[in-house]
Image (tube, rainbow, N blue to C red):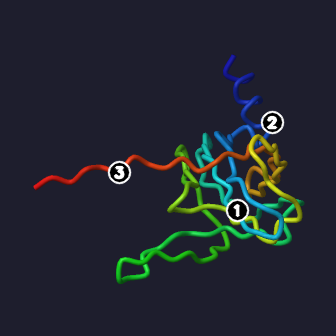
Amino acid sequence: MNILLALLIIFSNPSDKIKIKEPWMRISAKGQTTGLYFKIENYSDKPDTLYKVEFEPAGKVEIHETYDAGNDMMGMREVKFIVVPAKSTFELKPGAHHVMLMKLKTDITRDYQGEVSLYFKQAGKIDIKAEAKEMTKKKTMEHKH
């Protein structure tokens, strides 16, 4: 039994160690930009790196992070990769790390299903489908003194 388990681990597909959960993108219009969001679950004993994203209907695709630009302002900047630690989940979400889909060649309407390719150093290419949704507004918390 232990030999069988060892063989399964040795010959298992590397992409089985990375799972993509809850992929979605914001609705947008042709010529505009939108954001792509998802969770990366790394079941491996080793970190893995997301280093490239492809989305054919976008003229340009970049991985971004949101940062504090000072004076109560937030900024966005491109990052070349995201390292997902071993046995952890990394979430790309609004206001944090995300993928920018720029120079859209088509409208991204509600319920649009976009095919996206994610490239990892260990797991290789993982194809996903991301559904277009409207951004939900967060309920604001009341602040009382």
Cβ atoms under marks 1 and 2 closer than 8 Å: no
The residue lying at 63 percent from left, 74 percent from top is 79
If you read the primary sequence from the N terminus, does the residue marked by circle 1 or circle 2 appear first?
Answer: 2
Q: Nearer the viewer, residue 134 or 51?
A: 134
Report, in whole angstroms, how far the alpha carbon at label 1 lies from the one at label 2. Answer: 38 Å
Q: Quadrant of residue 83?
A: bottom right
Residue 94, horizontal then vertical, whole percent: 54, 58
Given the image, on which type of amino acid does mark 2 rest?
Phe
Residue hosting label 1: 34
Foreground mark, 2 or 3? 3
Determine which of the numbered discs, if any, sits on residue 11 in the image: 2
Quadrant assignment, res 34: bottom right
Q: CA distance from mark 1 to mark 3?
A: 24 Å
Q: Position of residue 136 (x, y in %)?
A: 54, 47
Q: Are marks 2 and 3 in contact (CB under 8 Å)?
A: no
What residue lies at 80% left-to-right and 39% top-to-bottom? 13
Position of 66 with respect to 57 (left or right) is: left
Q: Nearer the viewer, mark 1 or mark 2?
A: 1
What residue is rendered at 51% in x and 62% in y?
Answer: 96
User: How packed is label 2: few (under 14 Cα within 10 Å), some, or many (20 or more)?
Assistant: few
Give the residue at mark 3: 140
Q: Is residue 65 left or right of residue 52?
A: left
Q: Nearer the viewer, mark 1 or mark 3?
A: 3
Label 2, label 3: how many angstroms apart (C-alpha)? 49 Å
Judged from the image, the secondary structure of the residue bearing numbered disc 2 is: loop
